[in-house]
Image: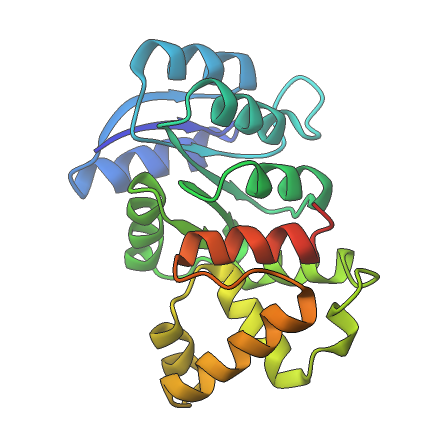
Amino acid sequence: MRVVIAEDAAMMREGLVRLLTDRGFEVCAAVADADALRSAIAANVPNVAIIDIRMPPTHTDEGLRAAIDIRRDHPDVGVLVFSQYVETRYATRLLADRPTGVGYLLKDRVADVAEFVDALTRVASGGTALDPEVVGHLMRAGQDTAGVASLTPREREVLSLMAEGRSNAGIAAALVITSGVVEKHVANIFAKLGLPSSDSDNRRVLAVLRHVGGG
């Protein structure tokens, strides 16, 4: 699996290169700014890119804007945003453009290398990987959206897990309830939010994120 890394902190960048190389990934470029990232994607067309948000020259949102460009110009390249920050405005746009091959993880909350590698692989394969804290920010940003306030506490838990990209079976395991109960909660959520039901996990994620994030 071919990977491009965009991270301006040299120690973090080199650490990611070594971590992924040791696990069989091919790191075809590791760069420190958004312009170099765009060039590296065009030159190498990897399976997935790992992108920090705040990079030179302004250290604000260069990475997210580059990620949106990559999703538009190279739709087959998965994008995993890996940052210390949650930027809801650009995150909603990034996640709502297409329901496949996208992730957003927070550096301080990734404690298990295996989970990170699994998330990266899932994004590269067209899946979704979202940190619960990112989901929470998006939900809070969309609290004024009709329907969200009507959800029960348990439905909000299920909604958060749906937005992370979990299947009904995964939600059942996380909440220690049966799949049948999850299905009822999911049906209630779709009804309250006015969303069409779907068997596709990625389409469920897209619908949920568009709604709670105001997309």
- The image quadrant where one finds the N terminus is top left
- Given the current orientation, which residue lies at the most extreme left position? 24
Kindly tell me whether residue 130 is visible in this rendering. Answer: no
Position of residue 93 relative to residue 38, above or below, is below
Left or right? Give the position of 182 relative to 212: left
Position of residue 95 relative to residue 155, above or below, is above
- Percent position (x, y) of residue 101? 40, 40
Left or right? Give the position of 114 relative to 95: left
- Percent position (x, y) of residue 124? 31, 39
- Percent position (x, y) of residue 133? 60, 61
Nearest the viewer among 211 and 84 is 211
- The image quadrant where one finds the C terminus is top right
Q: Residue at left 40%, top 87%?
A: 180
Q: In which quarter of the image is residue 170?
A: bottom left
Nearest the viewer among 104 and 209 is 209
The colouring scheme, among rainbow, by chain, secondary structure or one colour, is: rainbow
Nearest the viewer among 57 and 195 is 195
Q: Residue at left 64%, top 50%?
A: 210
Position of residue 104 relative to residue 3, above or below, is below
- Percent position (x, y) of residue 188? 59, 78
Left or right? Give the position of 70 relative to 136: left
Position of residue 53 relative to residue 40, above or below, is below
Q: Residue at left 64%, top 46%?
A: 85
Q: Residue at left 30%, top 24%?
A: 46
Q: In which quarter of the image is residue 102?
A: top left
Kindly tell me whether residue 205 is visible in this rendering. Answer: yes
Total marks in image: 0
